[in-house]
Amino acid sequence: MNWNGICRVFEDNKDNPPENEEATRFRVIDLILDALEYSRMEVYPNRSDGSGGIPDYTILPNHEKEFFLEAKAWNVPLREDFIRQATNYAYQRGHRWVVLTNGCHWQLFDSYIQGKSSNRLVLSYEFHGAKSDAPPPLIFQAICRESVISGRTDEYALSSRLRELIKKELKEPNSSIIASMQRNIRRRDGFGKVTREMIVSCLTDQTPCSGSRSIPDSVNEIIKTRNSNPSCKTLAELENDPPKGDKPVSVCFPDGGAEAVRSWKDMTMAILNWLASNNRIPAIPYSFASGKSYFLNTSPNHQKARMRSPREFQYNGQAIYVEAHGSASYLVSKTLEICRQVGFTGDEFNIEIRF
């Protein structure tokens, strides 16, 4: 890849930008594709994709790594409808990668990602005084000929997405990563009262006791909703020390994951969903000790009456209903009973409580 050549293309056009899409393609995009080391025989303009669409560029045609590039005029922002158009071309042909650019702003999309078209964005770069002595942006490293042919495009895209995911997770006190860190830190002597907000503050270089730095808004918002620092108890501990007007904040699972909750019913459903996803649900229907009512059933009914407060979760493709009517102590007791039925002691599930 010729990064110096790409920088020259931008420098040549930034003060005298192309007037329309055709000029943008001729003066910018074609030259950058050259710098990315695609030969003119490997770049087909305006070629039908076989399903009624005509992408602006088909790159590496008839090759297993074939991908599309959609072009817009230099002064046209890359709108959502352009993204849909570009990703639809790729999706219809079973191609994974598609590039959208106006010459100045470059975006790479992964059509294998589910959801809205905009969620498929994996790499992006906009020229603002690009310098040839700086490392090439990841998007150009990912879409240069060598990377595409060798399959390394996926590595660049995944690395970028992972970086963004971790950055986001480390800023959110209720994320599973922060929950796992808190659980491990609290096991160490002298760290039993460490909160997730404190961990986030450290990771984001925010010092709560320092007047010169402010805690992020997202953290402040969560702090405002809590009267005091939460405490953590295992499900087994709650059996001997039942909750009395307290509310759960989150559940930490045996695998290190976590889920935010707002009520004891939510706690029960979170644990049951986790058990179901790990194939650890007892035989259904599951009765109370008296045998006159069900705690779990394939319909929202007991033997002779409907459940008073049925909640639903999925297990092996089937809806399972939970009788969630009852006090906090009752829900803790029944949830713990289920866990013990499938081989847990209850100490594996940590419940964060707001007093």
Image: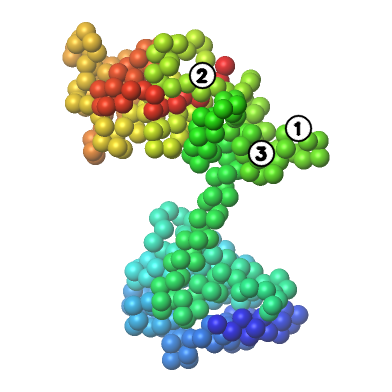
Spot occupied by residue 248 in the image (x, y as percentages of width and height): 49, 22
Q: Residue furthest front?
A: 189
Spot occupied by residue 242 in the image (x, y as percentages of width and height): 44, 11
Residue at image location 62% in from the left, 33% down from the top: 197
Q: Quadrant of the C terminus?
A: top right
Q: Nearer the viewer, residue 172 or 265?
A: 172
Q: Is residue 174 left or right of residue 305?
A: right
Helix, strand or loop for disc 1:
loop
Circle 1 Cα neighbour tier, 10 Å, few/some/many (<14 / 14–19 / ≥20) = few
Q: Nearer the viewer, mark 2 or mark 3?
A: 3
Question: As displayed, is residue 208 above or below residue 167?
Answer: above
Q: Quadrant of the N terminus?
A: bottom right
Q: Quadrant of residue 299?
A: top left
Mark 1–mark 3 Cα distance, whole angstroms, equals: 10 Å
Circle 2 Cα neighbour tier, 10 Å, few/some/many (<14 / 14–19 / ≥20) = some
Residue at image location 43% in from the left, 87% down from the top: 42
Question: As displayed, is residue 237 above or below residue 43?
Answer: above
Mark 1–mark 2 Cα distance, whole angstroms, equals: 27 Å
Labels 1 and 2: the sequence-earlier one: 1
Q: Is residue 130 left or right of residue 108?
A: right
Helix, strand or loop for disc 2:
strand
Q: Is residue 304 left or right of residue 210?
A: left
Amino acid type at image mark 2: Lys
Label 3, on which residue? 201
Spot occupied by residue 88 in the image (x, y as percentages of width and height): 41, 66
Label 2, on which residue? 247
Amino acid type at image mark 3: Ser
Q: Quadrant of residue 103?
A: bottom right
Label 1, on which residue? 209
Work out whether residue 282 can be spotted. yes
Helix, strand or loop for disc 3:
helix
Amino acid type at image mark 1: Cys
